[in-house]
Amino acid sequence: MRGRMRLWSAGRRSAAGLVMTATLAAPVSAAPPAPSAPSGGAPRSGLFALPEYYLSGHGPVSVAAGDLTGDGRQSLAAVNIADGTVSVLLGRGDGTFGPPVPYPAGSGPSDVAIEDLRGVGVLDVIVADSSSGLISVLLGNGDGTLGLPVPYPAGPGPSSLSVDDFNGDSVPDVAAADQYSGTVSVLLGRGDGTFGPPVPQLAGSAPSSLDSGDFNGDGITDIAVVNLGDATVSVLLGNGDGTLQPPRPYLTGPGPTDLAAAVLRGESDDEGKGGAGKGKEGGGGDAGNLDLIVANAGDGTVSVLLGNGDGTFQPARPYLSGPGPSAVDTGDFSGDGIADVAVGNASDSTLSILLGNGDGTLGPPLLHLAGPGPSTVEVDDLRGDGHSDVIVANGRGSTVTVLLGNAAAGAGADAGAPGGGGGAAGDARDSC
């Protein structure tokens, strides 16, 4: 599964616990066609409850969700690049969270993932440290606390992580996008929370994010990585032993920053991930093929590359999303069983929702306020109610934003957003 995303199974610290509620709520493919134009970009009433903002640390650039306490409640882990920490916010089971508890994470933490690395039913935290070229592992204690970080070498400047099984032994491994060397490094897991040495594979120019999945239906995990330096996404098919085949690049849009792999054609799974990994099920011959969605900061679009099911992809088709898109994830936000796309827009601090049509195309962006400089978007079910919720790490501030999904709600929720006549920021309240 993807870096800057979810489980593979898929400076100054402010006062703890503050929450603010607001009513704003092979060959390279040919050049892509012109982007599909939006029809207004007005906010979608009822998709989300009012956003809440939780302090995490200084410069939160990535966030992940997982049950760190073993009680069925989703908690959050956010890495703070200015503090060199990872903060744990314990979940209460209702979509709200306690104050942040920071742990040392290494130098320049840039991405975080949560997974049971030891197979004992306890989730652990994995952090990419871009400044030191390391991966830090903080083993979980099962009560929401973490052990000290144990570093493992990756490649130069690891910017993004994907935790998945790359050699078919049912043990989680780690892949990192190494932005300074143009490589992807794979660290094979030993099943006890430790990892072997990194095995690098050329990917492209300045890889910025990656995701993993079975792109050709052979039961072996593959990797897709977006390359900021040459505006491509490279697909590296897996050999089943932890090594990868040479990259095959496809053009994206200018300045690709993030990507997600999901099935946009046919019905989504119960977490709105488009049935990733399910193979071909229903909806025609293309249903079940993994597709790629790329956020392009250079032109305010997301590119969709539809998968052919054999490890190749169709040329990118762009859709307008918002200014400076920096992060992307997928979920079922409208409750229709079809995967939709969530995009964080760094230039205007908004979240765009592009509803899926079920055939691989997307609707116009529906805007919602997020926070200063959205750098990661994470989709999860935080309340166990079957709705897709969104967590945004606000890299230019000190908060994470939580937007609880309200797919079945009527008009009124999240009624205010840019272009929608929303109100001013509301009161701050304590999260304790």
Image (cartoon, rainbow, N blue to C red):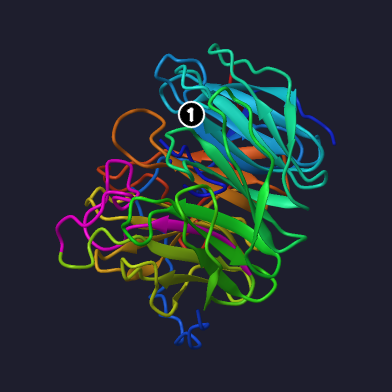
Relative height, residue 43 to residue 429 (above, below):
below
Whether 280 is among the magenta residues is: yes
Quarter of the image for the C terminus: give it: top right
Is any atom of residue 400 visible in this view?
Answer: yes
Vertical position of residue 344 compared to residue 65: above or below: below
Whether residue 349 appears in magenta in the rendering, the answer is: no
Residue at the spot of label 1: 66
Is residue 426 shown left or right of residue 110?
left
Residue under the image location 62 percent in, 65 percent down:
203
**Residue at x 55%, y 11% (from the top left corner):** 143
Q: Amino acid at mark 1?
A: Gly
Q: Which residues are magenta?
A: 256-283
Instruction: State the SS at label 1.
Output: strand
- Residue at x 79%, y 30% (from the top left corner): 13
Q: Position of residue 393 (x, y in %)?
A: 61, 44
* Residue 82 found in image quarter: top right
The residue nearer to you, when weighing 27 against 79, is 27
> Residue 430, position in %: x, y?
61, 22
Residue 430 visible in the snapshot: no
Mark 1 neighbour density, 10 Å: few (under 14) some (14–19) many (20 or more): many
Q: Is residue 394 left or right of residue 307?
A: right
Residue 226 in the image: x percent, y percent? 58, 65
* Residue 123 at x, y percent in the picture: 52, 23
User: Of 419 and 354, which appears nearest the observer?
Assistant: 354
Of helix, strand and loop, which mostly describes the magenta segment? Answer: loop
270 or 415: nearer the eye? Answer: 270
Residue 379 as seen in the image, left or right of residue 411? right
Above-or-below relation of 379 to 99: below
The outermost residue toward the right is 11
- Residue drawn at (62%, 25%), measured in percent from left and top? 88
